[in-house]
């Protein structure tokens, strides 16, 4: 079964190339294709990405934001017959068999429509960047569990969750058929929160695979803060 991996690039070809290299080096078991969507970069990203072998490069006519760019890749992949879609931030690198481990859990659980992984900080690989989350409807917030804490080994291969960050989402094609594409109302951030709600409303559970690991270049000092119309993010320690 082929997984279509979608990387969104905007003026960040060096990160994108490092991400592609990590996939090629660490994912030997999975049948996959890499689709890079360039979101109308203003630097020489397109020229540099055209030099990379074994990727599909799609060029957006405008920078419509995170969801808009990823939806270009999703629609292309589905038109080509994809059954699994992996949205992966271009500023990440993956550990050995990360995608295969997520796919195994997702494929073994019929009630699960989408799965994420354990995300650690690129510059401090002991600290958790993301490992599941909950939506607090009373406060209108998303609580990201264990963020900025040191990861402790456990015997669980996965658990269910209510929030998966858009940094890494492996999605069954049937879920997209029912829940639709990413909401494009947000330029960047919080579209992942709404999409998780849509997937659960479509009757699917969400999961986190603890043994599948990626490293994210998000700064541990700044983190992901902010206020949107409907959602904001807090950290549970």
Image (cartoon, rainbow, N blue to C red):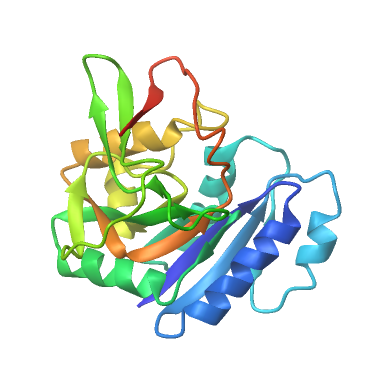
Q: Quadrant of the N terminus?
A: bottom left
* Residue 154 placement (x, y as % from top left): 20, 62
* Residue 127 placement (x, y as % from top left): 43, 50
Query: Toward which corner of the image does residue 148 lie, by quadrant?
Result: top left
- Whether residue 80 is visible here, answered yes or no, is no
Please, is residue 210 above or below residue 186 in the view? below
The residue shown at (66%, 66%) is 18
Please, is residue 31 above or below residue 142 in the view? below
Query: Toward which corner of the image does residue 66 lie, by quadrant?
Result: top right
Nearer to us in this view, 180 or 6:
6
- Whether residue 123 is visible here, answered yes or no, is yes
* Residue 14 placement (x, y as % from top left): 74, 60
Please, is residue 184 above or below residue 232 in the view? below
Q: Quadrant of the C terminus?
A: top left
The residue shown at (15%, 43%) is 203
Nearer to us in this view, 220 or 156:
220
Left or right: 67 as drawn, with respect to 143: right
Left or right: 31 as drawn, with respect to 159: right
Nearer to us in this view, 43 or 149:
149
* Residue 8 placement (x, y as % from top left): 61, 51
The residue shown at (14%, 61%) is 110
Left or right: 12 as drawn, with respect to 111: right
Could you tell me how many numbered marks the image carries? 0
The residue shown at (38%, 17%) is 230
Which residue is most to the bottom?
A: 28
Please, is residue 164 above or below residue 31 in the view? above
């Amino acid at each position: 079964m082929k997984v279509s991996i979608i990387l969104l690039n905007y003026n960040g070809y060096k990160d994108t190339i490092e991400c592609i290299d990590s996939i090629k080096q660490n994912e030997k078991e999975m049948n996959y294709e890499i689709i890079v969507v360039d979101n109308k970069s203003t630097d020489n990203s397109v020229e540099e990405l055209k030099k990379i072998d074994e990727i599909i490069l799609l060029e957006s006519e405008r920078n419509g934001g995170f969801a808009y760019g990823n939806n270009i890749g999703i629609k292309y992949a589905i038109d080509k017959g994809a059954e699994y879609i992996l949205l992966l931030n271009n500023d990440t690198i993956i550990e050995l068999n990360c995608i295969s481990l997520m796919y195994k859990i997702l494929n073994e659980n019929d009630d699960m429509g989408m799965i994420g992984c354990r995300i650690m900080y690129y510059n401090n690989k002991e600290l958790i960047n993301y490992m599941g989350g909950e939506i607090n409807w009373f406060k209108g917030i998303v609580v990201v569990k264990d963020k900025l804490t040191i990861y402790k080994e456990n015997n669980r291969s996965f658990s269910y969750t209510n929030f998966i960050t858009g940094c890494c989402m492996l999605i069954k094609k049937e879920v997209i058929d029912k829940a639709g594409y990413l909401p494009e109302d947000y330029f960047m951030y919080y579209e992942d929160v709404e999409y998780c709600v849509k997937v659960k409303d479509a009757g699917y559970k969400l999961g986190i695979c603890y043994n599948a690991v990626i490293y994210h270049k998000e700064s541990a000092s700044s983190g992901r803060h902010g206020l949107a119309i409907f959602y904001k993010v807090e950290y549970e320690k």
